[in-house]
């Protein structure tokens, strides 16, 4: 009976919201990587290819000076030198998070994509849940209560 009482007390003290916030905070780099992967693939937050394209001058510049992802011209990657990608970080406000970067390049990208089409798509969110959230949540629950998911 004492074990049951202890389990109930442990469950009362377990704060799933705080655990999830901690997981997102500690794994912000992975969230940024997932957003960068989507941008590199030309995918919006609905999982669909974006319909924007580079102007002829930009295509010429990317062919002449671009390297790796910076040379891709069949879809918009927002990558030439990697500067904007390197400045990206996971920003948490309240119960929400978003990948952002300071600077002109990010602002111009957001004007082009639009707030309503920017963010992680369902595939990326599921990947984060399967790789990070579920295992780490299960670990925290086990540690606090002894219960296994």
Image (cartoon, rainbow, N blue to C red):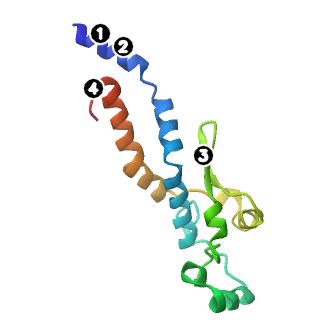
Real-space Cα separation, disc 2 to disc 4, in angstroms: 12 Å
The answer to whether marks 3 and 4 mark residues whose Cβ atoms lie closer than 8 Å is no
Q: Which residue is mark 4?
A: 146
- The residue positioned farthest toward the left in the image shown: 1
Look at 50% across and 30% down and name the residue there.
18
Image marks 1 and 2: residues in contact by CB distance under 8 Å = yes
**Label 1 packing within 10 angstroms: few (<14), some (14-19), many (20+):** few
Q: Please, what secondary structure does the residue beneath circle 2 have?
A: helix
Which is more N-terminal, label 4 or label 3?
A: 3
Where residue 84 sits: x, y (%)? 66, 66
- Mark 3 highlights which residue? 97
Callout 2 crowding tier (Cα within 10 Å): few <14, some 14–19, many ≥20: few
Residue that carries the numbered disc 2 in the rendered image: 9
Residue 54: image x %, image y %? 69, 82
- Of the residues under marks 2 and 3, which one precedes in the sequence? 2
Compare marks 4 and 1 and give the one earlier in the sequence.
1
For the residues labelled 3 and 4, the Cα–Cα distance comes to 30 Å
Q: Quadrant of the N terminus?
A: top left
In whole angstroms, how far apart are the C-alphas of marks 4 and 1? Answer: 13 Å
């Amino acid at each position: 009976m004492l074990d049951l009482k202890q389990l109930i007390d442990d469950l009362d003290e377990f704060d799933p919201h705080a655990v999830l916030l901690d997981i997102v905070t500690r794994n912000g780099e992975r969230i940024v990587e997932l957003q960068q992967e989507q941008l590199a693939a030309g995918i919006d937050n609905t999982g669909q290819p974006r319909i924007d394209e580079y102007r002829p001058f930009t295509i010429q510049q990317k062919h002449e000076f671009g390297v790796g992802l910076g040379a891709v011209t069949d879809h918009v990657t927002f990558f030439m030198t990697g500067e904007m990608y390197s400045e990206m970080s996971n920003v948490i406000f309240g119960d929400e998070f978003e990948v952002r970067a300071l600077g002109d390049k990010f602002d111009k990208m957001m004007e082009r994509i639009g707030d309503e089409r920017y963010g992680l798509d369902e595939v990326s969110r599921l990947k984060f849940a399967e790789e990070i959230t579920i295992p780490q949540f299960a670990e925290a629950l086990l540690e606090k209560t002894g219960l296994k998911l």
